[in-house]
Image (cartoon, rainbow, N blue to C red):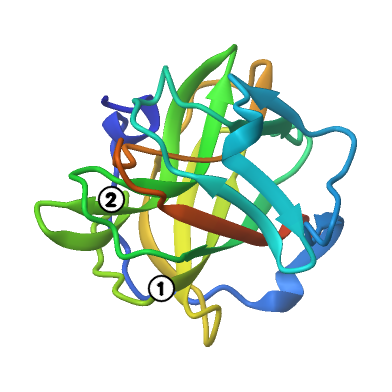
């Protein structure tokens, strides 16, 4: 699938740090034994997700962006009001084996997935998509920054050090939007699980 956000004038800007003090956390969910009530499931398979004191785990099943099972969604912050950062830490328990096997953040607009920030197996390489920097570490912290008219995809291997920018591009005007945690293109005959921790939504501080 091609994502609208990736098709609109994407420009790679690798290695750009973002200062932590730019952001004020307005919501967080560590996924420790329970999740916030505003989360909802898209095409839920109750046997293929679990939550405990170590976080939320979802089994990666076969499928595509528009058929993904167990996509966890919540209302997205209003891009017309401020700039926002969406953070989550993703850990894969099993080395991916399937082409396009992936997990991370997907942005929905008017009920459709329009772009994603994921760790993905592509042609034998583990990459951050978009941008395609290599990502061999089993754990990665993802940060998706959205403004009224743009997105920026960032990551931190092992959730350490400064965020690096993988790619950035334009967004259509704000609509009815949701942010999703999900994974798909898993193998049909093996249990590949991915863990999500430390979900946060932060607002950029005004000068």
Precedes in sequence: disc 1 or disc 2: 2
- Residue at position x 29%, y 74% in the image: 136
Q: At numbered mark 2, what does the secondary structure look like: helix, strand or loop? A: loop
Q: Residue furthest top?
A: 110
Q: Nearer the viewer, residue 30 or 153?
A: 30
Q: Toward which corner of the image does residue 16 lie, by quadrant? A: bottom left
**Residue underneath mark 1:** 138
The quarter of the rendered structure image containing the C terminus is: bottom right
Q: Residue 89: x percent and y percent?
A: 59, 65
Q: Nearer the viewer, residue 18 or 60?
A: 60
Q: Residue 150: x percent and y percent?
A: 50, 39
The numbered disc on residue 21 is none
- The answer to whether 44 is drawn above or below residue 57 in the figure is above
- Is 166 on the left or on the right of 26, as rendered? left
Q: At numbered mark 1, what does the secondary structure look like: helix, strand or loop? A: loop
Q: Toward which corner of the image does residue 93 lie, by quadrant? A: bottom left
Q: Toward which corner of the image does residue 185 lie, by quadrant? A: top left
**Residue underneath mark 2:** 11
- The answer to whether 43 is drawn above or below residue 12 in the figure is above
Structural distance between the alpha carbons of marks 1 and 2: 26 Å
Q: Residue 108: x percent and y percent?
A: 56, 25
| Pair 1/2: label in front | 1
- Disc 1 + disc 2, Cβ < 8 Å: no
Q: Residue 105: x percent and y percent?
A: 52, 45
- The answer to whether 146 is drawn above or below residue 148 in the figure is below
- Is 118 on the left or on the right of 26, as rendered? left
Q: Residue furthest left?
A: 123
- Viewer can see residue 23: yes
């Amino acid at each position: 699938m091609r994502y609208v956000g990736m098709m609109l004038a994407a420009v790679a800007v690798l290695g750009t740090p973002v200062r932590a003090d730019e952001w004020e956390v307005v919501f967080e969910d560590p996924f420790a034994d329970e999740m916030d009530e505003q989360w909802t499931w898209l095409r839920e398979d109750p046997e293929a997700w679990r939550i405990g004191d170590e976080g939320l785990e979802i089994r990666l099943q076969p499928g595509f962006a528009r058929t993904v099972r167990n996509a966890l969604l919540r209302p997205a912050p209003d891009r017309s009001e401020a700039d926002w950062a969406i953070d989550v830490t993703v850990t894969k328990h099993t080395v991916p084996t399937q082409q396009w096997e992936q997990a991370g953040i997907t942005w929905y607009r008017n009920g459709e997935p329009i772009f994603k920030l994921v760790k993905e197996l592509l042609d034998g390489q583990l990459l951050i998509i978009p941008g395609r920097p290599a990502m061999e570490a089993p754990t990665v912290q993802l940060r998706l920054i959205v403004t009224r008219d743009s997105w920026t995809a960032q990551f931190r291997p092992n959730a350490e050090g400064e965020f690096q920018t993988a790619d950035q591009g334009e967004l259509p005007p704000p609509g009815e939007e949701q942010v999703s945690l999900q994974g798909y293109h898993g193998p049909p005959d093996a249990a590949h699980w991915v863990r999500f921790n430390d979900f946060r939504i932060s607002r950029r501080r005004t000068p």
